Image (spheres, rainbow, N blue to C red):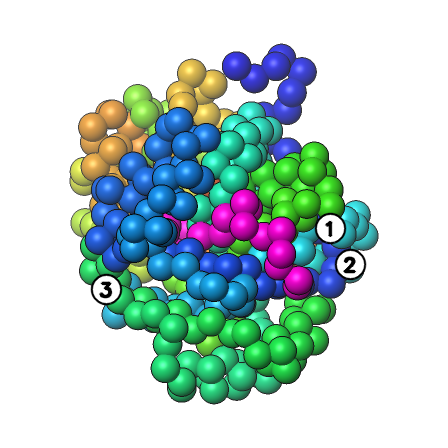
Amino acid sequence: MQPMDEPAVVTPPHLGRPLRLTTFRGLTLAPRWIGGPSTARTFARPYRDVARRLARWERAGRIAGDAEPAVYLHEYVVAGTAVRGLVGALDLTHRSEVLSERAVLPHEGVHLAQVRDLADRMHEMQLNPAPILLVHRGPAPVRALLTEVAAGPPTRSFLDAGGTEHWLWAIKDGATLDALGGQLATATPVIADGHHRYAAYLRLQQQHPGTAWDRGLTMLVDQDDTPLRLGAIHRVVPRMRLEILADAASGVEGGRWRALSGADEGRALAETGDGDVGTVVVTDGGDRWVAWDLPHPPDAATVEVVHERVTPLLPRSRKVRFEHTVSAACDRARETSGLALLLPTPSFDLVAAVVRQDRLLPEKATSFQPKPPVGVLMRSLRDEAGDPR
């Protein structure tokens, strides 16, 4: 249970520059264990047995492990969308509260209890089971260098149990690693996925300085190379009638409430648009649809306005639920006799602009897709004593 005086959501600690991805000895589960329901069983309780289990599997050939440490180029294709990124062990030893000196920018807060649980779990497993996901607009020389790497034969390639194709290139050449390190030292990526694991990394580093916990497994994606898709996360308010919200909406100065006759999910998507223009579509999931134009500062995301101006209007007894698609939100609204608040998708540049102004977006503000499946690249903390980098 969360202590009474502990805040529900806090800002993760800030990592300072330079951004540095270091080498590690990559471990990869057998393809049939990746992307399917069996993956979760690999990391099941008791967590203290996971490290021994993986060592046993590596000896038995159920895990591919590289003899030498490397930084990896990982490319994967999900439903026709290709993503590639650099996977390395992120140096966690620098901290900075100065905005201009931060190396990684979170865009959401974290729950301390969840951070502690994840840190304890990783410490028991002695493992980073999956990389956190960072995204930025990277320098052109890095894109050219990675294109050159990808032109060569991959270290491993396979189709996983979920139907995702993967290619891995182990980058071990000192000159290439130095070139990447020099180009990325001043990068300031945004966390796309893994805020709680990032905070857990920093907690473990603080507890165990000078050990392998000084680093944490990370994937860095260039949005100008293979862009991740951003999606909105919609809100559903159970047991809520449109008339009650309409009455509350009248108290939002500068807002405009427009009935959408004959609307459907397609019309809702057209109203919210791709540019985050400040319009929220409200529906009971049936035949009642309304466009709510909210006052929208040019440097703000609509989800911020909803969190600051709309959420306080809702009855405290209503627990807001989250859905990743319009259809799922409409279904949930019907099931709960409630309302779906369908939000526009913020652009990556808007998310980056918000965090560079030292603000955080509300919880469950964005969905970056597709994420890399668990088990493609893992990092064992037990076998790094001799890693020179």
Residue placed at 71% from the left, 69% from the top?
Answer: 186
Residue placed at 59% from the left, 38% from the top?
Answer: 200
Disc with the residue nearer the chain's start (3 vs 1): 1
Element carrying mark 3 = strand
Which quadrant of the figure has residue 169?
bottom left
Residue 316 visible in the picture: yes
Residue 223 visible in the picture: no
Q: Is residue 388 magenta?
A: yes
Q: How many marks?
A: 3
Q: Amino acid at mark 1?
A: Thr
Image x and y of residue 312, in percent: 53, 28
Cα gap from disc 3 to disc 1, whole angstroms: 36 Å
- Which residue in the protein does label 1 denote? 93
Q: Amino acid at mark 3?
A: Leu
Image x and y of residue 174, in percent: 62, 78
Residue 38 shown left or right of residue 178 in the figure: left
Element carrying mark 1 = loop
Disc with the residue nearer the chain's start (1 vs 2): 1
Which quadrant: the C terminus?
Answer: bottom right
Magenta residues, as a range? 366-389
Q: Is residue 309 magenta?
A: no
Residue placed at 49% from the left, 43% from the top?
Answer: 127
Question: Which label was assigned to residue 101?
Answer: 2
